[in-house]
Amino acid sequence: MSSENQELRDAGLKVTHPRVKILQMLESSETKHVSAEDVYKMLLEANEDTGLATVYRVLTQFEAAGLVTRHHFEGGTSVFELSTEHHHDHIVCNKCGQVQEFYDAVIEEQQEKIALKYEFKITDH
């Protein structure tokens, strides 16, 4: 059994050809943050006959199952990245749209201090 098949089953999803192919595209992509249109183009380049509507539907299913995280960066296009167990933040170039991931313990600690000061509990950021 392929690792993609097992990942889908572990996420509670039925194994289908489009789901397996889309998961493979996400795992093999050179960029970590891809739009539905990017995935669709990758599928076309691989001679896979999967429609854009199917790509959107599968990515939404992956998001609900916790396999991917959807981000809404400046520019309006949603991008998806495979979910990871480690927390990280993103910095985005307003000119070219490049996304850089980073983690900074000082920033995380400062956020916690500010939340505590204002009696908030950080659930996501």
Image (spheres, rainbow, N blue to C red):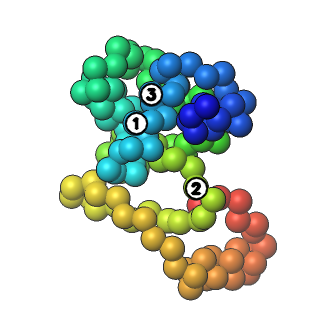
Residue 7 location, x and y as percent? 63, 38
- Check contact, mark 2 vs mark 1: CB within 8 A: no
Q: Which of 17/116 is in front?
A: 17
Residue 27 location, x and y as percent? 44, 44
Residue 43 location, x and y as percent? 33, 26
Q: What number is the disc on residue 21? A: 3
Residue type (three-letter) at the residue carrying disc 3: Lys
Pair 2/1: label in front? 1
Q: Which residue does the numbered mark 2 point to in the structure image?
A: 84
Name the residue: 56% across, 19% down: 16
Could you say which quadrant of the image residue 77 lies in? top left
- Within-10-Å neighbours for mark 2: few <14, some 14–19, many 20+: few
Could you say which quadrant of the image residue 85 lies in? bottom right
When the figure is inspected, residue 84 is found, relative to residue 89, above or below; the finding is above
Pair 3/2: label in front? 3
- Check contact, mark 3 vs mark 1: CB within 8 A: yes
